[in-house]
Amino acid sequence: MQLNVKAVSNDSKQSQGKTYWGIKHEDGQWYNLVQDQKPSIGQKFEADVKESRFNNRTYRWAMAIAPPQPEPEQPAYSNRATQPWSEWESMAARAHALAKVLEPDVTVLINEESGVSPQYSTTVDRSRARMAFVATVLIAFSNGKIADDHLEEGMPF
C-alpha cells in the first residue's frame, strides 16, 4: 500500500524495541509507521500494513518495504510562498474585475409613480459583496484550487 503523508505526530514512540511515528494518510486514517527518522509531510512510502485491535480500537502498523520517494520540491521562496506577488496581484485584479461585473452598484430611481415627488435616486452599494468574492477567490487560489491560465487564453478575467 502506498502511504502519502499528510500529517505527522510531533514525537516518536517505542513499541517492542522499535521506533514508530504516527502519520495521517490522505484517506484520513492514522498509521503507525515503523522507522527511526521522522517522516515529512508530502513523503510517500510503499508499506506493508497490518491491522491489530486492542480495547475496541483498530491500530494500523506500517512497515516500509521500499525507501521513501523523494520529497516534493520545496518552493523557491524563502517564506514558503507558493506563488510570487505578481501572480497574487494579477489574480486579485482579475477577481475584482469579475466581481464588478457580477455585483455592480445599482442606482434606483424613486419617481412620482411610487408616490414620491419630486424624483429621487439612491445607490445600492455592493462593495462588500465584491470584497467577499475577491477574498474567496484568493483563498481558493492560495489552496491551489484555481489555475492561473486565463490570461494565456486571452480571457478578460
Image (cartoon, rainbow, N blue to C red):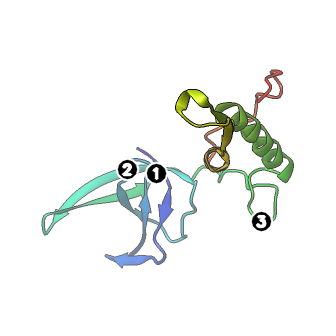
Instruction: For the N terminus, give its image quadrant.
Output: top left
Q: Could you say which disc has been placed on residue 48 in the image?
A: 2
In this figure, which residue is indicated by the disc labeled 3? 79
Helix, strand or loop for disc 3:
loop
Q: Residue 3: image x %, image y %?
A: 45, 49
Q: Amino acid at mark 1?
A: Ile
Determine contact: label 3, label 2, CB under 8 Å.
Answer: no
Q: Residue 147: image x %, image y %?
A: 69, 35
22 with respect to 88 (left or right): left
Instruction: For the C terminus, give its image quadrant.
Output: top right
Q: Nearer the viewer, residue 49 or 72?
A: 72
Is residue 115 something one can see in this rendering? yes
Q: Residue 150: image x %, image y %?
A: 76, 27
In this figure, which residue is indicated by the disc labeled 1? 65
Q: CA distance from mark 1 to mark 3?
A: 34 Å
Indicate the quadrant where residue 75 lies.
bottom right
Q: Residues within 10 Å of mark 1 (few under 14, many from 20)?
A: few
Q: Residue at x 82, y 29 (%)?
A: 151
Q: Residue at x 60, y 30 (%)?
A: 112
Q: Nearer the viewer, mark 3 or mark 2?
A: 3
Determine contact: label 1, label 2, CB under 8 Å.
Answer: yes
In the displayed image of the protein, which residue is found farthest to the right? 86
Helix, strand or loop for disc 2:
strand
